[in-house]
Image (cartoon, rainbow, N blue to C red):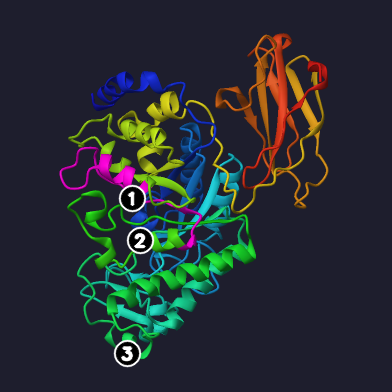
């Protein structure tokens, strides 16, 4: 009954939104590996089953309209990839430090499967958490908490890297750089586990402050700058190594209560989370605040927080984190139209996109959520929005676009254009289809019929689907950061 109820409640809200699907929109999902939240479903699952689970999940996300995945590769100073610095994750193999048998590199698999579906893959790191729960399982001897206890802050049942220790900061930077240099990721993503949510850090880092204060006299300002300094260094490394890679962070949705009139957890003074500095200094490409509350929440209303965040983004992208695993759950006691209404508000406020926590709420279609996205909000494909500060030069338009036919297909193919003025060739192409009686308008997502894969220069359309004699096809070229060329009209369509 819940699934039926969800659909019925959403339809009246969404009917007016069916033709409001923007062509440029970031549509993301967090794939959490810690505690086997999303993948794999249990530690030590056979490799073959792990692959099947990931492929099926990515298929479901693609079908729902998702165009970006935040794949968690580092949960507690461990690795779901072949790391130079950290042991294989317990959540992957059931034993920290044990490699998958037969061998599997989950990050490499995730990248290839995402790119095969025209989905961006952002490597998601937990920057400081070292031991989520002390004693939960046996740590490998190579784990940083064993190798370098002097870099560790310890709390009741939790250990973390000390953000104020310069060697610990360098270690995190090396871990991230290792992935950046060796994997074809589209983004580097950090969550907001900086200093602990609770208990609040008190004197655990007093010796570090004494030895490495860097001229600060206020410990709170120093702690915030510890985080900010790492973010500055990471942004510099990303831009110097692979300038097309995006860097973003998903902070807790409330910075300080006075900013948006809320009455909740104060991340600025407890987590030492300082997103306004990241935005002021423009050391992130996007900010992805976790606005995990309802529109009319009594202490943290979405309808107040969202407008405030739009005022501080400072020419960077703003993607909103939504708590779909709560608001699409069978036991949710709120309004099942909540998530849809939040997406509508985002679009009305010119927010660049949404990210849902977590992927299983979509891949398992909780309360019909995936169906709702596919049928209404993500009815048409979307391109992740352009980041003009990273690259604003489009590739050259495709050449020699032509339409031919065989017994089964209408075939649209073209040739790769020459190199653009920035030295880049196209990364992929988009095919648009129009009726001959209609004007050519590539600004509307509903006219997109196909996005190619890297290097692909052909599209096959089954004849049975459309009266191809009444259609016009045009093709554009896009670079890795989604700058789009002018369109080229097919020769057989009058071009």
Reading the image, the residue beneath label 2 is 192
The mark lying in front, picked from 1 and 3, is 3
Compute the Cα span from label 2 to label 3. 25 Å
Q: Quadrant of the C terminus?
A: top right
Q: Which residues are magenta?
A: 281-309
Q: Main secondary structure of the magenta part?
A: loop
Q: Mark on residue 210?
A: 3
Residue 290 is tagged as: 1
Whether the residues at callouts 1 and 2 have beta carbons within 8 Å, the answer is yes
Please state, as top left, top right, bottom left or bottom right, where the N terminus lies in the image.
top left
In-front residue for pair 221/471:
221
Q: Is residue 77 visible?
A: no
Q: Position of residue 380 (x, y in %)?
A: 52, 27
The quarter holding residue 224 reads bottom left
Query: Seen in the image, is 263 located left or right of residue 69?
Result: left
Seen at 50% across and 53% down, the residue is 47
Of discs 2 and 3, which sits in the foreground? 3
Residue 69, horizontal then vertical, whole percent: 48, 47
| Cβ atoms under marks 2 and 3 closer than 8 Å | no
Find out whether the residues at labels 1 and 3 contact each other: C-beta distance under 8 Å.
no
In front here: 240 or 184? 240
């Amino acid at each position: 009954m819940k699934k039926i109820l969800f659909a019925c409640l959403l339809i009246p809200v969404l009917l007016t939104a069916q033709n409001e699907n923007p062509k440029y929109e970031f549509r993301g999902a967090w794939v959490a590996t810690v505690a086997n939240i999303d993948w794999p479903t249990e530690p030590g699952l056979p490799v073959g089953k792990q692959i099947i689970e990931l492929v099926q999940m990515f298929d479901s996300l693609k079908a729902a309209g998702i165009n970006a995945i935040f794949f968690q590769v580092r949960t507690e100073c461990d690795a779901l990839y072949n790391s130079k610095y950290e042991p294989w994750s317990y959540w992957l193999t059931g034993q920290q430090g044990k490699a998958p048998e037969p061998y599997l590199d989950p990050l490499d698999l995730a990248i290839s499967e995402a790119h095969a579906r025209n989905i961006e893959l952002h490597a998601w790191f937990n920057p400081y958490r070292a031991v989520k729960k002390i004693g939960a399982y046996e740590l490998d001897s190579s784990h940083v908490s064993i190798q370098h206890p002097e870099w560790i802050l310890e709390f009741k049942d939790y250990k973390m890297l000390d953000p104020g220790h310069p060697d610990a900061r360098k270690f995190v930077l090396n871990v991230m750089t290792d992935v950046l240099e060796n994997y074809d990721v589209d983004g580097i993503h950090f969550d907001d586990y900086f200093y602990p949510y609770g208990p609040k850090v008190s004197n655990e880092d007093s010796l570090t402050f004494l030895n490495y204060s860097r001229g600060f006299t206020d410990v709170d300002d120093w702690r915030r700058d510890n985080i900010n300094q790492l973010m500055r260094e990471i942004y510099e490394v990303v831009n110097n190594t692979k300038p097309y890679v995006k860097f973003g962070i998903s902070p807790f949705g409330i910075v300080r209560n006075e900013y948006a009139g809320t009455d909740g957890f104060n991340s600025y003074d407890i987590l030492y989370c300082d997103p306004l500095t990241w935005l002021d200094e423009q050391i992130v490409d996007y900010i992805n605040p976790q606005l995990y509350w309802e529109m009319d929440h009594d202490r943290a209303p979405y309808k107040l927080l969202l407008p405030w965040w739009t005022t501080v983004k400072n020419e960077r992208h703003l993607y909103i984190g939504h708590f779909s695993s709560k608001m699409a759950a069978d036991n949710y006691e709120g309004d099942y139209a909540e998530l849809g209404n939040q997406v509508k508000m985002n679009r009305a406020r010119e927010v660049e996109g949404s990210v849902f926590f977590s992927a299983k709420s979509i891949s398992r279609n909780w309360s019909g959520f995936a169906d709702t996205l596919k049928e209404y909000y993500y009815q048409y494909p979307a391109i992740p929005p352009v980041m003009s500060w990273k690259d604003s030069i489009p590739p050259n338009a495709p050449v020699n676009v032509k339409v031919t036919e065989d017994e089964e297909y209408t075939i649209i193919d073209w040739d790769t254009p020459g190199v653009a003025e920035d030295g880049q060739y196209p990364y992929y192409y988009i095919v648009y289809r129009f009726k001959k009686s209609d004007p050519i308008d590539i600004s509307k997502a509903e006219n997109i019929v196909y996005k190619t894969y890297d290097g692909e220069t052909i599209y096959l359309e089954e004849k049975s689907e459309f009266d191809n004699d009444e259609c016009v096809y045009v093709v554009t070229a896009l670079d890795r950061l989604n700058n789009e060329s002018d369109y080229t009209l097919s020769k057989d369509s009058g071009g």
